[in-house]
Image (cartoon, rainbow, N blue to C red):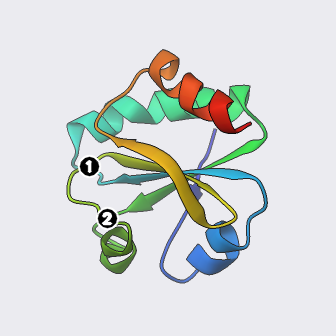
Amino acid sequence: MAHLQITEKNYEQEIEQASGLVLLDFYATWCGPCKMLAPVLDEIAEQYPAVKVCKSDVDEAPQLAAKFGVQSIPTVVLLKNGEPLDGFVGYRSKEQIEPMLEKYL
């Protein structure tokens, strides 16, 4: 499943104006743990249609990464109405991510 790519240009429309939960993954194409996390987020996107799963490349959108204080990747932020609710840094399995989602659904 293709993720919506978030850039500094479409951030406001796709994230801040989104209703419902958004899972935003800050990643880089050269990052090993980011590559491991990608199929997990694909599964989440399929299993949780109420959650909008998005990705933002830190090399292409550095100001966006800075806005969220991203210092390590992958960094995943769960947002609702543009406001951060929860998140994590590093690789997590689907079983580790699901309780975070269930808490807010």
Q: Quadrant of the C terminus?
A: top right
Q: Quadrant of the N terminus?
A: top right
Locate residue 56, reporting x and y percent. 44, 61
Residue type indicated by callout 1 = Ile
Q: Badges 2 and 1: C-beta atoms under 8 Å apart?
A: yes
Q: Please identify the quarter of the rendering in which residue 70 is found.
A: bottom left
Locate residue 12, reporting x and y percent. 62, 79
The residue lying furthest to the bottom in this view is 9
Q: Please identify the quarter of the rendering in which residue 79 is found.
A: bottom right
Q: Residue at x 54, y 83 (%)?
A: 9
Dot 1 crowding, Cα within 10 Å, few <14, some 14–19, many 20+:
many
Identify the disc placed on residue 49.
none
Asked if 7 appears above or below 1 in the picture, the reply is below
Locate residue 69, reporting x and y percent. 30, 66
Q: Residue at x 49, y 73 (%)?
A: 7
Relative horizontal placement of residue 5, taking residue 73 as reference (left or right): right
SS label for mark 2: loop
The residue lying furthest to the top in this view is 95
Q: Earlier in the sequence, mark 2 or mark 1?
A: 2
- Identify the residue position indicated by label 1 in the image: 73
Relative horizontal placement of residue 87, taking residue 74 as reference (left or right): right
Relative horizontal placement of residue 65, taking residue 16 as reference (left or right): left
Locate residue 48, reporting x and y percent. 72, 32
Residue type indicated by callout 2 = Val
Q: Residue at x 50, y 16 (%)?
A: 95
Q: Please identify the quarter of the rendering in which residue 11 is found.
A: bottom right
Dot 2 crowding, Cα within 10 Å, few <14, some 14–19, many 20+:
many
- Identify the residue position indicated by label 2 in the image: 58
Query: Considering depth in this image, is 96 or 1 the residue closer to the camera?
Result: 96
Relative horizontal placement of residue 81, taking residue 89 as reference (left or right): right
